[in-house]
Image (cartoon, rainbow, N blue to C red):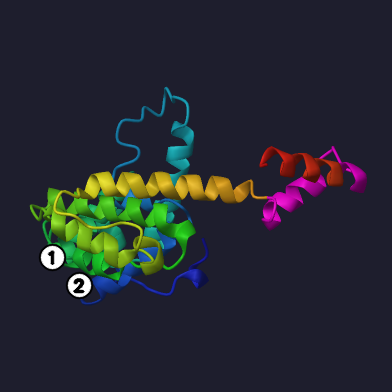
Amino acid sequence: MSQEKIAIILTGSSNYFEWMNHIWAEFSKEKIINYLYTDGIKDIDTKNLKEGEDEKLAQNGTAKSIIIHSISRKIHSEVVGMESAFLMLKKIQRNYGGGENDTTYWMMKLNSLKTSNEKEITNFLEEMSNIFNTLEKADCKLSNIEKLKYLYNALPGEYMKKYILKDSTKYEELNKEIQEDIKNRLYNRRDNPMEIDFVNRGSNSKKHYTKDKMDQHKKQKILCHL
C-alpha cells in the first residue's frame, strides 16, 4: 500500500472517528472487515500452521499495513511491535477513542448502515451482527426491538415489504431468514436463462446448441408445463 492512497492520518482524538471511517472503508475494500471485531491470528502457531491459517496471517498483514500507513509517527511508536491488527486497533481506541467501552463510534456506524442493493444485504447483515456483538461486549446490549429497527432501516424498503413485523419476531431468526432468501434469490437468478451471466456461461461452454436443437429444447420445456 502506497502512502499516496491514504487520505486520512490519525493524529489524535480530534480525528479518531473520521479515521475509523477510513479504516472501515479500507478493510471493507480488502474484504477483511472481520479484523475490526476479532483477533484473527490469536491462536495461530506460526511454526505449525494449519490449513487456512497462512491466509489469515496474510489478511492480518494487510490490515496492519493499512493501520500503520494511516497513523502519525507518535501513534506508530505506541503500537510498534504488535503482531495483531485487532489489538493495534484496540490500543488506539483506548488511547484516542474514549476507551474500550466507548460506544459512540459503533452507534454512529450502526446508524449509517443502509443499502439499496440486494446483493449487499448479506454483507450488511453480517456487519450489523458484528456491531451488535461489539456493543454487547462494551456493556451496551440492544433490545430485540432496537435490533429489528436497525435491520429494517438498513435494508431496501421494497425488499422488506415481504416481512411483517410481529411481537414474536426475533432479530436472529429474521436475520437468518433473510440471508436464506437472498441466497436462494441469487442462486435462482444465476440460473435464469434471461440473465446475462447465464448467457455468457452458456456461450463459453464446450457444448453449443444449434438453432434447431434450441427450438426443440424450448418445445420440450413448454410441454413439461402443460
Question: Can the viewer see residue 198 in this picture?
Answer: yes
> Is residue 211 shown in magenta?
yes
Q: Amino acid at mark 2?
A: Ser
Numbered marks: total: 2
Question: Local crowd at mark 2 within 10 Å, few (<14), some, or many (≥20)?
Answer: some
**Measured from the top left, where is residue 121 in percent x and y?**
41, 57
Q: On residue 6, which mark appears?
A: none
> Is residue 52 shown in magenta?
no
Helix, strand or loop under label 1? loop
Q: Amino acid at mark 1?
A: Gly
**Measured from the top left, where is residue 180 in percent x and y?**
40, 44
Q: Are marks 1 and 2 in contact (CB under 8 Å)?
A: yes
Q: Residue at x 21, y 66 (%)?
A: 105
Residue that sits furthest to the top in the current view: 48
Front-lying residue, 126 or 210: 210
Magenta region:
193-213
Q: Residue at x 7, y 52 (%)?
A: 139
Helix, strand or loop under label 2? helix
Front-lying residue, 139 or 91: 139
| Residue with the mark numbered 1 | 98
Residue 63 to residue 220: above or below = below
Front-lying residue, 37 or 86: 37
Q: Quadrant of residue 100?
A: bottom left
Q: On residue 13, which mark appears?
A: 2
Question: Can the viewer see residue 60 in this picture?
Answer: no
Q: CA distance from mark 1 to mark 2?
A: 8 Å
Q: Is residue 178 left or right of residue 186?
A: left
**Measured from the top left, where is residue 226 in percent x and y?**
67, 42
Residue 49 to residue 12: above or below = above
Q: Residue at x 84, y 38 (%)?
A: 206
